[in-house]
Image (cartoon, rainbow, N blue to C red):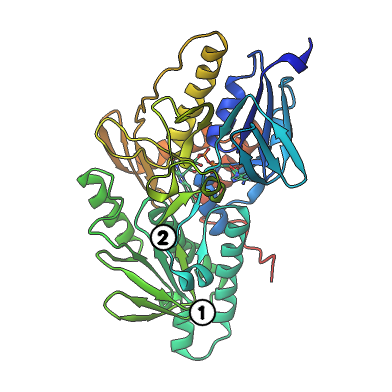
Amino acid sequence: MNTQKLPHVVIVGSGFGGMEIARGLANAPVQITLIDRHNYHLFQPLLYQVAIAGLVPSQIAYPLRTIFRKQKNLTFQMGELTSVDLESRYVKLEGSVISYDYLILAVGGHTNFFGMNSVEQNSFQLKDIDSAINTRNHLLKMFEQASREADAEKRRALLTFVVVGGGPTGVETAGALAELISHVMVKDYPQMDLKDAHVLLLEATEHLIASYPDELRKATRDLLLRKNVEILTNTILANYDGQQVTLGDCTQISAHTLIWTAGVKAAEIVNKLGIEQAASGRVRVTPTLQVPQRPEVFVIGDAAYLENGGGQPLPMLSTVAIQQGKITAQNIKRILKGQSPEAFRYKDPGLLATIGRNAAVARIWGISFSGFIAWVIWVFLHIYRLIGFRNRVLVMVNWAWDYIFYESQVRLITKE
Ligand SMILES: Cc1cc2nc3c(=O)[nH]c(=O)nc-3n(C[C@H](O)[C@H](O)[C@H](O)COP(=O)(O)OP(=O)(O)OC[C@H]3O[C@@H](n4cnc5c(N)ncnc54)[C@H](O)[C@@H]3O)c2cc1C
């Protein structure tokens, strides 16, 4: 087969969307180049487990060259996309230029601090493996420092953990952190009075997990309170200097840890494209996920802005990225056959968030679940979706161990 003559599809980003397109084009008459700055696919929804020392990175990330070993029409290139020439149809990585017939930008998003530089510099975030490990190291160091701190007020500041953002990631992180303290650290630090340790969850609006139905918001609040998470809704973070949290009403809280989960915006690279952007920097795409006037360029997932039937932007969720990846692969095949691409319609599979061990909230098939049943659904869905049989088994064994012994396995401080 002369691959030179096949249309060249360049996919940038091997997250949920990019992976789905690459797989969807496995048997298509195209040559694919998949580009990512990392050599692995990352299951971001479990990053918080790495941060709270529950899982190790290799359990939620899988090497791309292994995943695509058998896909003969795909080549992987590790590198940072630095620019795109839409006119001449090529992309630039550090050191190489790659031309394309079709380009798919599945570059995802990154943390949005809404211009609060001091918060950006001093807070912790959960966006990639490095940031999750940094968070883990810091959290564990706080317990070490607190264990040798004689001054009660200073000890309390070391053991005050503030999570900002009452969306699913904030709720999951706060719940898991509270359990790390109450079930694991109490055993590791028997001499220390961990009544000083507490987790605060700040949310600017009236509700936690605002997009969920009322009964699940209430269940979430109750579950978190039961785990001793202090919840402050209608509370705006004004500043954080690494030692003091300042709230909108000028209240000060001494805390050495602030984890920011309150905002996401499209990946930096899309700002360089000269294409119209909407809220959070996302690229405005047509209903077929193409860039207006550039039918050979598709943008999908967190980086793309498209509204649902009700005029609301589609959420930045893995389920959206996966479904958009699927239809984009189909649309490229349609275009190659001379057919028109089909419009994207999001099929909402439901909502799911876990609140520590044993508890979650879920809305599936129009029914709301909370507590243990929701947690079992959450465990099975997440493990099912994890890439690679080995990872599924490892994560399952880890969780079963934690579940039975109230343990958390990876309490290693690995970086200064
Ligand atoms: C902590 C956390 C928890 C989450 N929990 C959930 C959840 O429970 N359920 C849910 O549905 N969603 C959740 N999400 C959101 C979900 O992860 C995203 O919506 C999804 O990953 C978006 O998929 P994507 O393909 O658009 O981008 P991503 O999966 O982010 O992939 C983008 C890829 O592009 C690469 N990339 C970016 N820029 C460049 C560049 N310039 N050069 C080269 N490569 C580049 C990145 O390395 C990355 O691999 C969570 C996200 C986070 C951060």
Disc 1 target residue: 192
**On screen, residue 330 above or below 53:** above
Q: Position of residue 224 (x, y in %)?
A: 33, 58
Quarter occupied by residue 337: top right
- Residue 299 or residue 345, whichever sits in front: 299
At 26% across and 64% down in the image, what residue appears?
Answer: 233
- Residue 12 or residue 208, whichever sits in front: 12
| Residue at mark 2: C-beta within 8 A of ligand 1 | no
Q: Residue furthest front?
A: 87
3D distance between C-alphas at marks 2 and 1? 21 Å
The amino acid type, in three-letter code, at marker 1 is Met
Disc 2 target residue: 174
- Residue 357 or residue 73, whichever sits in front: 73
Quarter occupied by residue 146: bottom right
**On screen, residue 246 above or below 369:** below
Q: Position of residue 171 (x, y in %)?
A: 38, 55
Task: Decide which of tag 2 and tag 1 comes sooner along the chain.
Answer: 2
Q: Position of residue 211 (x, y in %)?
A: 28, 45
Q: Where, quadrant-wise, is the N terminus in this rendering?
A: top right
Dot 2 lies on which element? helix
Q: Is residue 252 left or right of residue 269?
A: left
